[in-house]
Amino acid sequence: MIIAVRTTVPAADLAVAREVTRFLERRAALEHPPATLTVSYAVALGIAGMFASPTLFGQVLDRFSTGGAVDGDELVEAAQFEQGFATAEGYAALRCLILWVQSRMQRQGQQQAWRL
């Protein structure tokens, strides 16, 4: 499923860190956080931009962070791969990106089912 974003302006690093922290605190406070509870579009782009690189997975993150449409499964796979090399903070940010992608994929799947 193709994932595209509504904005092409990624959040700055400090804004990413702030929103990721608040997001994780909100999720932790809920016993069963809803799948729709995610970071913003700008933060999702900012997270991807932080991990963009010339590697195969880094290129997927780069393509997404610059406003391109990417396959959701590829984006999740790229984020999961990068988690293996990230700091604790980076790992948490990538987890937020994964949850954001999964939420978008679920939402798009529901919209497609309603059209049938």
Image (cartoon, rainbow, N blue to C red):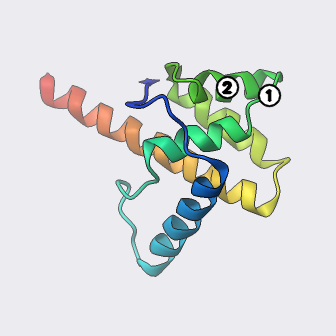
Residue 85 x/y as whole percent: 85, 47
Question: How many tags in the picture?
Answer: 2
User: Which amino acid, mark 1?
Assistant: Ser
Q: Residue at x 74, y 61 (%)?
A: 89
Residue 55 in the image: above or below residue 23 = above
Name the image quarter holding the C terminus: top left
- Mark 1 — residue? 53
Q: Residue at x 57, y 26 (%)?
A: 64
User: Which amino acid, mark 2?
Assistant: Asp
Residue 88 x/y as whole percent: 78, 63
Q: Residue at x 50, y 33 (%)?
A: 9
Q: Residue at x 59, y 54 (%)?
A: 16
Q: Dot 1, crowdedness within 10 Å: few (<14), some or many (≥20)?
A: some
Residue 51 in the image: above or below residue 22 = above
- Mark 2 — residue? 62
Work out whether mark 1 precedes mark 2 in sequence or the reverse, and give the earlier one. Answer: 1
Judged left or right of residue 4, residue 95 is right
- Judged from the image, the secondary structure of the residue bearing numbered disc 1 is loop
Q: Are marks 1 and 2 in contact (CB under 8 Å)?
A: yes
Residue 49 x/y as whole percent: 67, 35
Residue 27 in the image: above or below residue 54 = below
Q: Could you give the CA–CA distance between mark 1 and mark 2, rounded to whole angstroms?
A: 7 Å
- Judged from the image, the secondary structure of the residue bearing numbered disc 2 is helix
User: 58 or 43: nearer the eye?
Assistant: 43
Judged left or right of residue 51, residue 68 is left
Q: Quadrant of residue 80?
A: top right
Judged left or right of residue 81, residue 109 is left
